[in-house]
Structures are given as C-alpha cells and as structure tokens.
Amino acid sequence: GEIHYHEFVIQATPVKRLCEMHNIITVNGLFPGPTLEVRNGDTLVIKAINQAIYNVTLHWHGIRQLRTAWADGPEFVTQCPIRPGESYIYRFTIEGQEGTLWWHAHSMWLRATVYGALIIYPEEGSIYPFTMPKREFPILLGQWWNRDPNDVLRQAMITGAAPNISDAFTINGQPGDLYDCSSQETTVIPVVYGETNLFRFINAAMNNELFIAIAGHLMTVVAADAAYTKPFTTPVLMLGPGQTTDVLVTTTQAPGRRYYIAAQAYASAQGVPFDNTTTTAILQYVSAACPTATRTSPSVFPPLFPALPAFNDTQTAAAFSAGIRSPSPVDVPDPVDEHLFFTVGLGLFNCQPNQLCGGPNGTRFTASMNNVSFVLPQTVSILQASYLGAEGVFTDDFPPAPPIQFDYTASNISQDLQQPVPGTKVYKLKYGSVVQVVLQGTNIVAGEEHPMHVHGYQFYVLATGFGNYNPATDPAGFNMVDPPQRNTVGVPVNGWAVIRFVADNPGVWLVHCHLDVHIVWGLAMAFLVENGVGELQAVEPPPIDLPLC
Ligand code: C2O
C-alpha cells in the first residue's frame, strides 16, 4: 500500500455559529477537520502538533491498529496526552477494512470540535461490491454548544449534575436553516438528476443518537462501521455516536427542487432532558453543466422536509439496527472460550460533604460496568504500565459478571445497587481466545440505549433484545449466519446485545459507551489482550516520541 503523510495542527480557531463567534479547537483551522482518504492496505503517518491550550490525543475510531496499539489514542489508556507545544506521530496500517470510519480527539470533551472523516476505498485493483456511485459525500453529524464544550463538561463534573444540553446539532459543521441566523451557511450537497450517490454518514455527536432522513429519497444501506452490509432500503437511519452508515441515494426527484437531509435525537431515556432541535442540510439538484452549488432563492420553493420518527421511537431504532447484516455467510468464531456478562448503565453516588449534589435527590451522577466505575490513571497509560510491568497503575480484576444478579431492567431497583465502586480495572484476555460479551443495559436511575464501542476490534453482533438476557433461551436466536461486523453496538434501552470476537490483537483496548458524558461518569472498562505468556510482545515497541505524563 501507499504511505500517506499528514500534519494535524491542533489549534484555537475563531468560528461563528448561531450568530456567535467562538474560539474552538480545530485541526488545521478546519471545522469539521480534514477528511483522510486512503485505500485498504495503505499506511497513515500523522504528526499531531498541539498548539492549543489543552492536552490532547487523537483516536482513529474503528481502525483495528493490529500490533500498533500505541497509535490508538485514548488518553491514559494507550498514551499520555500530548501537552501544549508538543507533538506525537501516529503511524498505522489499514488491514482488511473498507468503508467509512472517522477520527476524533480522545481527551476530555475536545472531540466536540476535533473530528473528521476517514474514508477507506477498496484496495488497489478492487471495486465496491455495489453500483459504482457517481459522487460521494461524507456527512458528519455533530453537536454544538455556544459554550466551550470543556467548560460544559467541567461544570457537570463539579456539580454532579447532567451536562447542559447542546444548542444545536450540525451537519458538516453547520446547524442549518431551522436555527436562528444559521440559514445562510446551511450545508448544501449538490446532486445531479438520475445519478447514484454514496453518502457516508458519521454520527460524531457527543451525547445523542440520531435519526436521519432525506425528503423524497430512500436510502440503500451498503456498509456500516467500515464493513459492507447486505443492501436494504430504508426511509430512515439511526446512528449512535461512533457509528457510520454508508448509503446509496439515487436522485429520482424533480430537478430544480431542494430536499432537506434532516437529523434529530433518538432519545431513549424517559424524562431526561435532551436537545430536541433539528439539524438540516440541503440536497440540491444542479444541472450537469453547473456542478457548483448555487442556492436557488428560498422564496421560490422552500425545501421539502422528510418524515422523522418520534424522538422516543424505540421500535424504529431497534428495527433499523437489526436490519444490518453481513453481505454473505461468515464464519462466526465458535466455540466460546470466554463467556462475559457486563452490565452497562448509570448510577448515583451519595454526595460527600463539600461536594455539589446536582444529581437526582441530592446525589451525583455516575455510571458503571459490572458495578465498577472506570477511573483513568493519571501518571502513565495502562498500555505503558503493562508493557513496562509497572505496578500500582491498574488491577486486572475486572469482574466477568456483575457482583449480584438482579432484575436489571426493573424500574424500582434498590438503592444499594446505585453506588458503583470506582476503579482502574482491566480484564485479561488470552491472545487468540474466542470472546463473547453479553452487554446488559440496566434501569438503575434510568434506562437508556448505550452505544458501546470496543477499541481495536470489529466484533460480530449476534443478537439484541429487550428485557433481561436469558442464557437458557436467547442463544437459540443468535444469528450465526450473517451477523454484522461493527465497532459500536447500540445496547437497546432496557435490553441487551451479544457480541463475539477473536482476541487477535494484543494491547490495551478501551470499551466504553460513546455517549461522552457516560465515559466521564465511568461507563468504561478495558481489555488487556496478552500474547499468551503474560507479556505484550506482539505489540511493537513504543514509538520514541510517545508522550510522557
Ligand atoms: Cu470513538 Cu473511544 O472512541
């Protein structure tokens, strides 16, 4: 493959949105950041130069990072943050992945503005397994606060309350026509009548899953999370943060009109405030002779608006996700060596003296997996500590099952289940073992769909369901034929998902909810995948410029 060199300068950049000018953190002054375009088999070498006032790391979401865990990027997991004035070179090769991924900051809440598309074309000499599109467009869905997102996070952490809801969602960085003083900058996607286009949707929003629809156009799903899928046609998509979905859209509507691409929240938690605004971009038919986007006067015809599901339409969300399948039969790894059962959900800490207690009934919000609320180390990354054999940074006793069995999805869960134990705990996996994880959502505090992301792996999603997972009966319903390969799975609200993978990538791999507020509350753990002799020998040695804490 080819080697691509890039410089990513992380810097403060003045950007105007919703009538207000703000200094936001960007890469190379761009918002969203630069699009990376590579082929399967290529190598990326990206020098991240931190000229901002914050510590930062970059993560290449969904890239497997085989043997290159040092380039994965989550702060204090695979590296210490790059301090202001310093730099770090991320180097990795794309192996066996095609489609759409993305990159984003993995420090505090910097990813609110530090993100971009990572497009992987088929390897040299091969083509898409679907109609060759005439045009391709990355479509990044984001979330905008008028305040500095790090301040929003800081306030939530100080008060113990939920963070302030955002001021807008965005499409390619723009909120769109439906927000005040935003209409002149609406993203316009120029299309030509009668062509097939490939839209690469990426949900880069911080804290919301999103429904997406295009007025007058159906979408044919052909890939998700950089894996091709069995094509199916749908009027609406649902993407959790972290997920990508590639769709073909054929332009069959009357030329000369404009059609909104619209997105709004799928908010599965009952009674929890959320940003219920709608972001739009415009699909604009242009003539072949005039491919540049020129907006016809809105006074002639307003753009047509698509039907979007209600914000709490769990059935539509679940049906969409369940419709995603691998294109042809796959070899699901079997039998299973490691049967793991992880609860995922919120919790509440009792307030300590001198703490602010902004959560429900004078508590503070927290979150956990198997009753462990994940805490990042501060002096060295977990990968470095395990590589060097440093003691006292983490423990390897993350529990394979919750400490007690209970009715996970009942609404009146007893108080003593609400107080998870903070810890930096990993679960060790033997290199090459077949791992199955049942992710069970809980209804402690509130049930909510959790988009669970596993770093360093693409796993099969064998099944999802509502209620409590039943180990006696639910395995009969596993899809052992054509399950999809994903890096982020939505664990349905008050439900469960079953994932399976071979632990063939040594390193330390963060597993977390991609609703960012849940990460900082502790909805995370990490796998430590060894090579079988208790060391990480199959990982390449640390790069010489690896940042120190
Ligand atoms: Cu998209 Cu841990 O990240």
Image (spheres, rainbow, N blue to C red):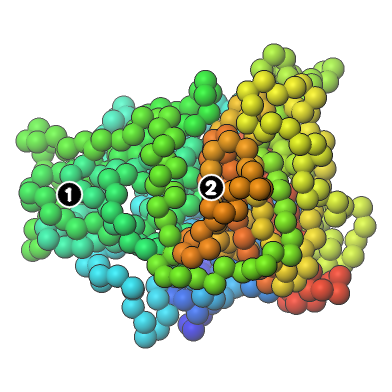
Find residue 522 and report its image quarter: top right
Residue type, numbered disc 1 = Gln
Residue type, numbered disc 2 = Thr
In the rendered image, the quadrant that contains the C terminus is bottom right
Depth check, front residue: 458 or 183: 458
Marks 2/1: CA–CA distance: 38 Å
Q: Position of residue 89 (x, y in %)?
A: 63, 68
Asked if the beta carbon under badge 2 is closer than 8 A to the nearest atom of ligand 1, the reply is no
Q: Are marks 2 and 1 in contact (CB under 8 Å)?
A: no
Q: Secondary structure at mark 1?
A: strand
Q: Residue at x 68, y 72 (%)?
A: 504
Q: Is residue 505 left or right of residue 193?
A: right
Depth check, front residue: 254 or 470: 470
Q: Please indicate, yes or no, whether residue 249 appears anywhere in the rendered image.
A: yes
Q: Is residue 306 left or right of residue 314?
A: left
Q: Residue at x 19, y 58 (%)?
A: 250
Depth check, front residue: 369 or 400: 400
Give the residue pinned by disc 1: 284
Residue 464, numbered label: 2
